[in-house]
Image: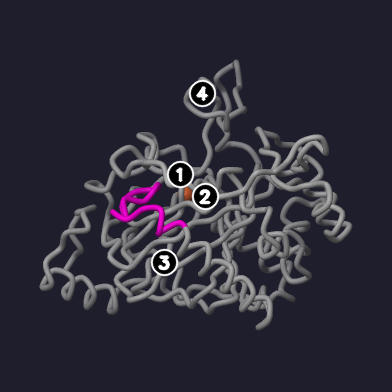
Amino acid sequence: MPTNHLTTDHLSETELAQRRTYLEANNGIRGLEVLDPSEVERAVKIFHRDGFVVVRDALDADQLAFLRNTTDAVMQEIVSLDPDRSGNRGSRRYSFGGSSITRSMLHLPAWQMLVDLPTVTPIVKAIFGSADYMLRAASGDFCLPGATGYQPLHADMRDFVDPRSTPFSSFADQRGHLSVRDLPCPYVCINFFTVDSTRLNGPTRQIPGSQHARAPMPTLAEEPEWMRVSTVCPAPAGAVQIRDVRAWHGGTPNLSDHMRAIPNIEFYAPWFREPIVPCITTRDHRGLSPHARAVTRFSVVDSADELLTGFEVTPTPPSLRPTAGGMSNG
Ligand SMILES: [Fe+2]
C-alpha cells in the first residue's frame, strides 16, 4: 500500500496504523552501508558517489550521553515555547539553530564537542582534501511524535538570489554556464544520530547520486514511491550521516513515541564562502582544540560584544513551508 501524499498531522488511527505497517515493511534504503570510522577512503568514495555516507561510532558512549542530555533539555525548552506544536520547519518539526536567538547552537559545549572529533575530522579533511575548511553552522533538526507528514524533497543550498530572500547564497556564474550543482562539493552537513534511526522515527530520506542533478525535484505529488522510502535507516545512535547538502533529501513521518533529534555541524569547503553568523565567545573559542579553533575562526563574536543566548519559536517562513520546499532535514 503506497503512503498517501498528506502533509497533515491529522490522520485517523486506522490511517496511522496502516502507515506504520507499511513503513515497517518498506522504509529504508536497501543495503545501506554503515561504515566504521577507520574506513576513511571508502567513506570518501561513497560520499562522492551517493552524496552522503553513514559512519557508526562517531561518538563514544559518554559523548553520546552528553549530546543526548543536552538535546533532550533543549528540545523540552523549545517545545515549551510552542504550545500548539506549530514548529518552525513545518508542524512538529524544528530547527535547533532556527530556534536559537544566536541562529546557532555553538554556545553549548555539546555542539562545541562535535566540531572536531577523531572519528569524523579525518573523513571531512579527506572529503575536502584539506584541513583548511571552515564552520558554517552548528544547528540540526528535531521532530516530535505525530509529525506524520513528508517534507518535499529539497536541497540546502542554491545559486545566488536577492539577499532579501536569504543571506545564504553567493554563487553566480554571470555567463549562465554553471550552477552550484556543477561544482565540487561546496559544503557538507554532518548530522549526529542521538537515537537509533529506525523505519518509524522520521529517518531522513535521501536520494543517492542526486548532488549534481539538474533535473527539477519532484513535488510530493510527483515523487515516486521508491524515493519516498529511500530513507537512512536502520543506523545506530552515535552514528553520523555526512551529506553533500545539494543532494535531494527531506523529512519523513515520526510515528514513534519519542522525539528524534539530528543535531548537526556544517562546514564550507576551503574555496567556498557564504555568510557566517558569529556564535561563539572568545573565551569559549580559546577552550577548543587547535583544529576546532581554526575551523571556527570566522565564528567568533567580537570581544567587545556580548553573546546573548536563548530560544524563540517563530512561524515557519514561507520559503520553508512544506508546499514551497524546505531547508531543513526532518
Ligand atoms: Fe534540508
Residue 109, image x and y in percent?
A: 70, 63
Q: Nearer the viewer, residue 124 or 148?
A: 148
Question: Identity of the amino acid at label 4?
Answer: Val
Q: Are marks 3 and 1 in contact (CB under 8 Å)?
A: no
Residue ID for mark 4: 161
The magenta stretch is 78-91
Q: Quadrant of residue 204?
A: bottom left
Disc nearest the viewer among 2 and 3: 2
Label 1 sits on what residue type?
Answer: Met
Q: Is mark 1 within 8 Å of ligand 1?
A: yes
Q: Is residue 302 magenta?
A: no
> Which residue shows up at 40% across the image and 47% down it?
88
Residue that numbered label 3 is attached to: 203
Task: Give the CA distance from mark 4 to mark 1.
Answer: 15 Å
User: Closer to the N terminus: mark 3 or mark 4?
Assistant: 4
Crowd band around label 1 with a 10 angstrom C-alpha radius: few (<14), some (14–19), many (20+): many
> Which residue has dot 2 on it?
311
